[in-house]
């Protein structure tokens, strides 16, 4: 049984078994500076119960329970406060209910996603925009992939690992 405490503003990347997961990781490996990509999806954790905000079939509220049995990395920015969380979350709530912008995926492969963002964010961009609006990320968040986030979180002194392993609720 996994034992850790979640807080509002924690963020995660996960490797799912979805049909598109393999394609996303193949593209990420090709685009990655280290040639590796372990995670294919990213999201924001809203509370200690594991409620999440993420871009799946639509941008909406979900729960960590859907990832039981999946490899996951959960992190916390050292500068995250409840006020920063509120600012970031309020900013990305404008996307609530929007459909997943599948048309953005080719833009990532062509390395155009950070420049062309006239629609809604994919999962990792949602996390990046959230961090930016919380005042904890210099990038706009657009064009970031789950692999980019995982690499940043693993390499930066500004993030603590809350959990890394196979999630078992």
Image: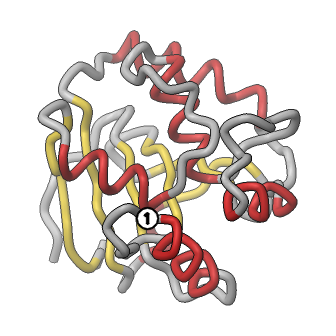
Left or right: 74 as drawn, with respect to 110: left
- Expressed as whole percent of the image width and height from the top left, the position of residue 71 reads 32, 78
Judge left or right: residue 59 versus residue 127.
right
Relative depth, front residue between 3 and 147: 147
Q: In the shown orientation, is residue 11 left or right of residue 25?
A: left
- How crowded pointer 1 is (Cα within 10 Å; few <14, some 14-19, many 20+) is rated as some
Task: Say above or below: 19 vs 15.
Answer: below
Quickly name the residue at label 1: 32
Q: Classify residue 53 by image quadrant.
A: top right
Q: Residue at x 19, y 66 (%)?
A: 164
Residue at point 16%, 50% (across, down): 161
Residue 110, image x, y percentages: 72, 59
Quadrant including the N terminus: bottom left
- What residue is rendered at 53% in x and 17% in y? 133
Residue 13 in percent (x, y) is at: 41, 60
| Side of 125 where 3 appears, left or right | left
**What x and y, as percent, mark residue 68?**
39, 79
Q: Residue at x 18, y 47 (%)?
A: 155
Number of numbered discs overlaid on the protein picture: 1
Secondary structure of the residue carrying numbered label 1:
loop
Q: Within the image, what quadrant is residue 34 found in? A: bottom left
Q: Quadrant of the C terminus?
A: bottom left
Q: Is residue 20 depicted above or below 148 in this figure?
A: below
Q: Nearer the viewer, residue 25 or 133?
A: 25
Above or below, comparing residue 152 to residue 145 in the picture? above
């Amino acid at each position: 049984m996994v034992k850790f405490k979640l807080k509002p503003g924690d963020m995660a990347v996960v490797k799912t078994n979805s049909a598109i997961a393999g394609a996303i990781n193949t593209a990420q490996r090709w685009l990655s500076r280290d040639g590796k990509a372990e995670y294919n999806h990213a999201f924001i954790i809203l509370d200690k119960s594991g409620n999440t905000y993420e871009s799946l079939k639509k941008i909406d509220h979900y729960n960590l329970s859907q990832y039981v049995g999946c490899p996951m990395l959960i992190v916390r920015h050292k500068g995250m406060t409840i006020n920063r969380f509120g600012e970031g979350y309020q900013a990305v709530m404008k996307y609530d209910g929007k459909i997943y912008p599948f048309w953005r995926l080719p833009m990532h492969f062509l390395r155009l996603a950070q420049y062309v963002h006239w629609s809604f964010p994919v999962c990792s961009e949602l996390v990046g925009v959230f961090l930016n609006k919380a005042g904890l990320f210099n990038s706009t968040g657009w064009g970031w992939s789950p692999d980019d986030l995982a690499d940043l979180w693993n390499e930066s002194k500004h993030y603590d690992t809350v959990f890394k392993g196979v999630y078992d609720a």
